[in-house]
Amino acid sequence: MSSERPGGPADVVPEDGEGHESEPRMTGSAVPTPASHRRRGREGKKKGSLLRELPVLLLVAFVLALVVKTFFVQAFFIPSGSMEQTLHGCTGCTGDRVLVNKVPYWFGEPEPGDVVVFKGPDTWAPEVSVAAPSNWLSGALLWLGRTVGVAPPSEDDFVKRVIATAGQTVECCDAQGRVLVDGQPLDEPYIFENNPIDQRAFAPVTVPKGRLWVMGDHRGASADSREHVGDKYSGTIGVDDVIGKAALIVWPVNRFGIVHAPDIQKNQAGAAAYAGATPYVVGAAGALPIVAWRRQRRN
C-alpha cells in the first residue's frame, strides 16, 4: 500500500516562497545570539541586585559599627593637654587619636596606673566646648566622627590616669613632693610639668566603694580629682562611668604605640596580675563544658 497522504508525499517540505514566508535574516555584528542575550540578562540582574542590596549592606555596616563602639573598641580624639606628654592634645600639638578598649573591664575594674576615658560627674566643668548639632545630618556626622575618633568627644568625656581605688586613702605629699596612697609614695615616671611642691598639697581622701581617684599626667594643667575634692563625691569618679582603657595611639602615625599603664603601686602587683588573668580563667571555665560534651559524643 502507498504511504503517501492525500495531497503529496509525506516527506516533502515546502520551500521558501512556495506557500510559506521566510523569516527575515540579519547579517553582521548586529545579529543577536542566545549567548549575548543571557550575558546582558545576567549583567542587568547583577546591577539591580546590587542596588537592592546596598541599603541592607549600609544598615549592616552601621549596626556592626554600633556594636563594636558600644561593647569592644572606640576611638577617641584627645582635645586637651591635661595628659601631656603621654597623650598629645594641647594647643599647638597634634591631637592624638586613641583606641579605647572596653573588654578589660568586663571582668574587672580599673587598676592604679590605667589611663581611662570616663563620663565626668555632674560637678565637673567641661575641658572642651563642643557646639551642639544644628540638625539630624550634622548630628549623624558628629556621631560618625566620634566613632572613628576624628571629632571632638562629648563635653562630659574626660581622660585621666587612675591613682587610687576603692578603700585606699590618697593624699599629697611626702618630703619629695610625691603623692601617697595608704602612706606609700607612688612611682610616677609619666608626670609632665608638675606643680611646685608648695602647691601640690591636698588633704587625705579615702576613696568610696565603686569610685576612683584620677589625675592628669600634666599635673600643672589638669583639672582632675584634686580640683573637685570639695564636691559631693570628694573629687572621685564612678567606676560605672568608665568607658574603657586607653590602649593604643593610632594617630598621628609618628606617635603610633601602646599607652602604658605602669605599676605605680608596687604593693598592687599581685592584685594586678590576678585581674589580668581573670579573662583567661573565665575563658577556660567556659570551654570546659564544651570539651566535656565533645568527649561524650565521641564515646
Image: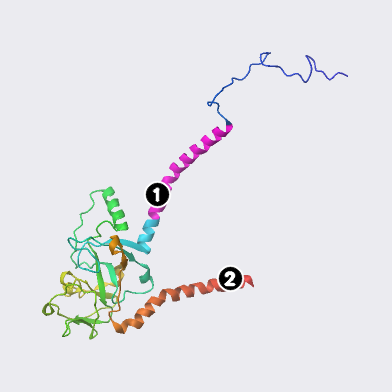
Determine the image quadrant of residue 278.
bottom left
Badge 1 marks a residue whose secondary structure is helix
Q: Is residue 77 magenta?
A: no
Residue 2, compared with residue 182, is above or below; it is: above
Residue at image mark 2: 294
**Residue at x 48%, y 72% (from the top left corner):** 286
Q: CA distance from mark 2 to mark 1?
A: 39 Å
Q: Residues within 10 Å of mark 1 (few under 14, many from 20)?
A: few
Residue 62, compared with residue 203, is above or below; it is: above
- Looking at the magenta stretch, what is its main secondary structure? helix
Q: Which residues are magenta?
A: 34-63
Residue at image mark 1: 58
Query: Left or right: where does residue 96 sit relative to residue 286?
Result: left
Query: Left or right: where does residue 61 sit relative to residue 243?
Result: right
Residue 153: where, in percent of width, then height?
Answer: 25, 60
At label 2, which amino acid type do we have?
Arg
Q: Is residue 43 magenta?
A: yes
Q: Residue furthest right?
A: 1
Q: Nearer the viewer, residue 248 or 179?
A: 248
**Residue at x 48%, y 74% (from the top left corner):** 284
Q: Residues within 10 Å of mark 2 (few under 14, many from 20)?
A: few
Q: Nearer the viewer, residue 100 or 71?
A: 100
Task: Decide which of tag 2 and tag 1 comes sooner along the chain.
Answer: 1
